[in-house]
Amino acid sequence: MTLPQATPTSPTFGAPISPRDSTPETPCRIDTLGGAMRDWIARLGTAWVEGEITEWNVRNVGTYAKLRDIDGDATISIRIWSSVRNRIPADLKRGDRVIACVKPEYWVKGGDLSFVVSSMRHVGLGDLLEKLERLRAQLRGEGLFDAARKRPLPFLPQRIGLITGQNSDAEKDVLRNAQLRWPSVAFEVRHAAVQGERVVAEVLAALADLDANPEVDVIIIARGGGDFQHLLGFSDERLLRAVAAASTPIVSAIGHENDRPLLDEVADLRASTPTDAAKRVVPDVAEQLALVRDARARLTGRVSQRLAHDAAQLEQLRSRPVLRDPERMLRERDAELEYALSRGRERLSQRLSTAKIETTALRGSLRALSPRHTLERGYAIVHLAGEAGGAIVRDPADAPEGTELVIALAQGSIAARATAPGPE
């Protein structure tokens, strides 16, 4: 029995397929695979490697070379761009043993893997690197790298101390850029060796001189980068402790990225280049004037707005009747008081008239009921005289014969004595 032959299918190309998802029927594109490799390799970052130079080709755009393991056959291709040539020794050649800081890069179009060099040095500096790492750990443990101990720079230093090489590009860059930003800035420049055996002593002397000057507000130590060996003086423990003990804020502007000297860690501010140091230390007069104009405009606007608001409120208050005609309220109150007084007088007059009428009526009633009124009509009132207390005699039996009597008349009284009653 013959089994049917499988008919091969043609690959289909559509949307880009991830290399992980590729199959014989849905293969991925080469540039997709290359891009994935490039991105993955880029995540590896930089690494320090040691090897022997087997090829060394210097061209205008850079140097192309190869490194081989000292005790093996593994080889890598390296590229040194012209922009970093000043960071590597000028005497490198084929056969030299070196240590290099490399970063892998994959070129998708050509399918080449190479390594870009950012720093390179001769083998033999390993002991120095180890010594520097021990010093770094010691100073970090003592707190010399702590951000809390770093002093802030003055906003506008009146005088800047500059320690740099004589007639160096670093000096020109700092002076030119600082004066462009703030033309009236003043400098105290101290020249010192920036590489070699004299670096530490001369920089220490210049630092002590400037730090003792009360007119110096900030000190810049500047150098325009260089090879690792050229920067060793700026990692010297004596210089680092002097910088940490200085009373004046210090800016480190050594200008090297891969092998940063320890001075960058101890200084109050690290500038990437001397030009950057000038920009960080001195404010830009144009920017400050713009800020002043903006602040003045905002202040003017706020004041104008406040004045307009207060003027509107004042006008609103002035438009009220009490302020527009202050005497009106007095006149109204005066009229109300006059009306109240008039009503009071009228009510009082009415009350007095009514009371007068009532008094007259009461007087008439009282007079009609008064005993005196009765006496005035010719009547008399007989009282008992003596100790009887003047009791009124209402019945003959109340005054037996011989009883002393008092007869009250309308105009006085007379004494009398009771006699026997006569026949009726």
Image (cartoon, rainbow, N blue to C red):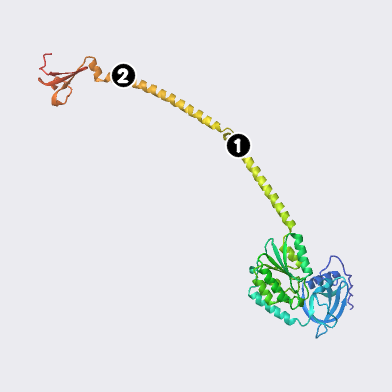
Residue 253, x across and y down, in percent: 73, 69
Three-letter amino acid code of the residue under disc 1: Arg
Residue 239, x across and y down, in percent: 69, 75
Marks 2, 1: nearer the viewer:
1
Q: Tag 2: Cα neighbours inside 10 Å, few (<14), some, or many (≥20)?
A: few
Q: Is residue 136 above or below residue 408?
A: below
Q: Is residue 212 above or below residue 297?
A: below
Seen at 86% across and 80% down, the residue is: 55
Q: Which mark is residue 401?
A: none
Seen at 37% across and 23% down, the residue is: 355
Seen at 36% across and 21% down, the residue is: 356
Q: Is residue 105 left or right of residue 423?
A: right
Q: Helix, strand, or loop for circle 2?
A: helix
Instruction: Kindly indicate the quadrant of the structure image that contains residue 132.
Output: bottom right
Q: Is residue 211 left or right of residue 122?
A: left
Q: Helix, strand, or loop for circle 1?
A: helix
Which numbered disc flags the more N-terminal residue, 2 or 1?
Answer: 1
Q: For mark 1, what is the residue?
A: 318
Q: Tag 1: Cα neighbours inside 10 Å, few (<14), some, or many (≥20)?
A: few
Residue 277 visible within the image: yes
Q: Is residue 78 left or right of residue 410?
A: right
Question: Gap between marks 2 and 1, in whole Å?
Answer: 67 Å
Locate the N terminus by quadrant.
bottom right
Q: For mark 2, what is the residue?
A: 364
Seen at 67% across and 62% down, the residue is: 154
Residue 220 or 26: which is nearer the viewer? 220
- 2 and 1 marks in contact (CB < 8 Å): no
Three-letter amino acid code of the residue under disc 2: Gly
